[in-house]
Image (cartoon, rainbow, N blue to C red):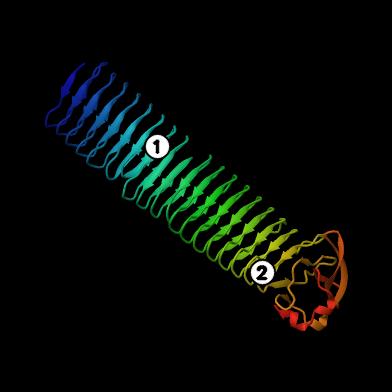
Amino acid sequence: MAIRNGTEGPDTLNGTAQADTIRGFAGDDILSGLGGNDLIQGGDGGDDLLGGGGNDRLFGEAGDDLLDGGIGDDTLDGGEGKDTLIGGTGNDFLFGGSEDEVFGGSGNDVLSGEGSLNGEEGSDTITGSFFEDTLQGGSGNDFLDGSLSNDFLLGEDSLSVAGADTILGGDGSDTIYGDADTLSAGGNDSLLGDAGDDNIFGFAGNDFLSGGDGIDYLEGGDGNDILDGGLDSNTLLGGTGNDTVTGGLDVDLIEGGEGADSLLGGDGNDIIEGDGIDVLAGNDTLNGGAGDDFLDGGAGVDRILGAAGSDTLYGGDDISGQTQRDTLIGGTGGDYFRLEDSGLSGQPGDYISDFQDGIDFLQTGFSFEALTISRVNLNIGGVSTGSTRVVVTATGEELGVVAGLLPGRFTAADFVAL
């Protein structure tokens, strides 16, 4: 065991294979612990502190210092100045100051401080400060906490932030928390926006995305995703896969994308589209919830429920060869059932299950005189029930079938123009 003390000038001091104490004092020093569990203190000046082997404690103190723990479970504290901290091999504790660059190296490291914090290899715990930080987890199952400022986080597994942050989860199964953030990840992820206006992207994998408070933008990407907009007015895009999307309490725009999706608007006057601009069909379930909603099933065999409020329901089929109908259920309130000519020969119209005579309306681009209203018997609950079929007279194209109401109940007043 040795004690090495420097001078007021630039010193080069080396330890032994034992547990040494090395103090640089003033000047730009090079201090090397070599083997053993060493204590190295830089003092004033721009110092290089090299732990070497062993579980070392390195304190940069004043000045712009380089701290390299080397092999072993080391503790590094940059102190004042613009420092670079490198944990090296082992499970290290690294404490950076303002404008420091911190690198954990291999091992399961704990990093904290201001500036740039990089976990690198291993399952790291990284905590930022009240200032603007950059946190990067690297490989491994990491936990990143940006604290309360405007941070940039790039991780692999579990992130927690507050402030106006940009967060990229990377591959792996991530859990990401943030306020007023941009969150994105690949893998089977849980991304939780919390308060603030969030932008959340699931990308690949079966993800859970929650916007929390604020005006949020959530996009599931590939995979079977669950999206929950939370409070306020949100934009929710399921993407590819069989998604479950819930709008929340305010005015939402919800788009299921490709796949068989379940879309629920919740409260507020929502716009819900089953397939968006995609070509591939999805057999979707749309539920407007409370509020005056617009629901568009898009391609595929859809089930559309307006629920409470004055809703507009549209099956939206445009795939040639489709032989099954969309089901439109208005629910309570005066609803508008949109009937449009698909332009495809033999395309079946929509099935309207609960048209309320004198309350609901059929919305179409054709005049009442251009339509043929005829009786058709439907098997409803095992009982043959007289219903009404609406056909374009000139082309014979079916627009829809209204269950339980006979043709004589319909007049021009039941039809409104698109």
Give the class, few, some or many, for how many residues have Cα within 10 Å of label 1's Cα (few <14, many ≥20). many
* Residue 336 locus on image (x, y percent): 69, 73
Q: Pointer 1 and pointer 2: residues touching (CB < 8 Å)?
A: no
**Element type at marker 1?**
strand
* Mark identifier at residue 332: 2
What numbered label is drawn on residue 125? 1
Residue with the most extreme left position: 8
Mark 1, mark 2: which one is toward the viewer? 2
Q: Earlier in the sequence, mark 1 or mark 2?
A: 1
Q: Amino acid at mark 2?
A: Thr
What residue do we see at 52% from left, 58% from top?
217
Q: Looking at the image, which residue is at 42% across and 45% down?
A: 160
CA distance for labels 1 and 2: 52 Å
Q: Which residue is at 39% across, 44% downward?
A: 145
Q: Is residue 255 left or right of residue 182?
A: right
Q: Left or right: where does residue 249 sit relative to residue 100?
A: right
**Mark 2: which secondary structure?**
loop
Q: Where does the N terminus fall, quadrant-wise?
A: top left
* Residue 243 image point, x, y percent: 63, 52
Q: Is residue 290 left or right of residue 62?
A: right
Does residue 155 appear in this view? Answer: no
Relative to residue 345, is residue 127 depicted above or below? above
Q: Nearer the viewer, residue 72 or 410?
A: 410
Q: Position of residue 263 (x, y in %)?
A: 63, 58
Q: Quadrant of the C terminus?
A: bottom right
Label 2: few (<14), some (14–19) or many (≥20) C-alpha neighbours in 10 Å: some
Pick the residue in front: 387 or 57: 387
The quarter of the displayed image where residue 117 is located: top left
Residue 114: name its quadrant. top left
Please name the amino acid that badge 1 sits on: Thr
Taking 22 as reference, is 238 above or below it?
below
Q: Is residue 339 left or right of residue 261?
A: right
